[in-house]
Image (cartoon, helix red, strand yellow):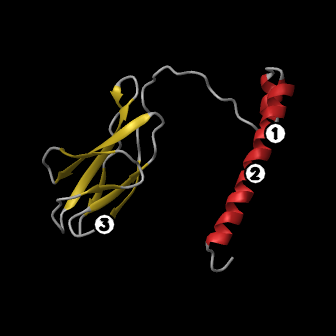
Amino acid sequence: MAQGGTQATAHKNNKRDALVSLLRQEANYVQLNGQNDLPTLLSSGFQVNSTNTAQSPLATSAILQIKNEMNGQLAVRVKCVANARSYEAQVKNGTGGFLPAGIFTQSRRMVLAGLMPGQTYTVQVRGVGGSTGYSDWSDPVSHMAM
């Protein structure tokens, strides 16, 4: 609907509930008829759900994008790391060492504040969690703060 509204939202929610119900029925059918045969299960289009709960080392995060937020701020987006509870960022300006820039709970938008406009900063990010506590630092990426 062009305007949306409560009626359109209710219609969308009803359609979603119907879809979820059908998908559950299909998954039950595959589970019952698959008889623990992995090739049969995989041929259905469903993926195998892992029951492994062991902690493992985190993969290295990668910076996908850095853009200017407000004056003296950079917004960083990184590739999500499986099993990471949070992300730690560090920055450096020029030839000095890296300084902590904060710990963030999401990978899509980390705002690094308190930066000097017109200065180029190098940013690195790592995941927090897993069996080792931290992933390796990402490759450094430079961006000028505005």
Q: Which mark is residue 106?
A: none
Q: Report the residue at 67% width, 64% height from top.
A: 10
Q: Position of residue 93 (x, y in %)?
A: 17, 54
Which amino acid does the dot numbered 2 rest on? Answer: Leu
The residue lying furthest to the bottom in this view is 2
- Quadrant where the C terminus lies? bottom left
The residues tagged by marks 3 and 2 sit, at their Cα atoms, a distance apart of 40 Å
Q: Position of residue 98 (x, y in %)?
A: 18, 44
Q: Which residue is mark 2?
A: 19
Secondary structure type for disc 1: helix
Q: Residue at x 32, y 44 (%)?
A: 125
Residue 68 tag number: 3
Closest to the observer, 18 or 84: 18
Q: Identify the disc placed on residue 26.
A: 1
Q: Residue at x 72, y 52 (%)?
A: 17
What's the distance in space between the residues labelled 1 and 3, CA to CA?
Answer: 46 Å
Q: Earlier in the sequence, mark 3 or mark 2?
A: 2
> Regarding mark 2 in the picture, which secondary structure is present there?
helix
- Do residues under tags 1 and 2 come within 8 Å of each other at their CB atoms? no
**Residue at the farthest right position:** 33
Foreground disc of the pair 3, 2: 2
State if disc 2 and disc 3 touch (CB < 8 Å). no
Mark 3 residue element: strand
Tell me if residue 133 comes above or below residue 123 in the rendering. above
Left or right: residue 68 versus residue 83 is left
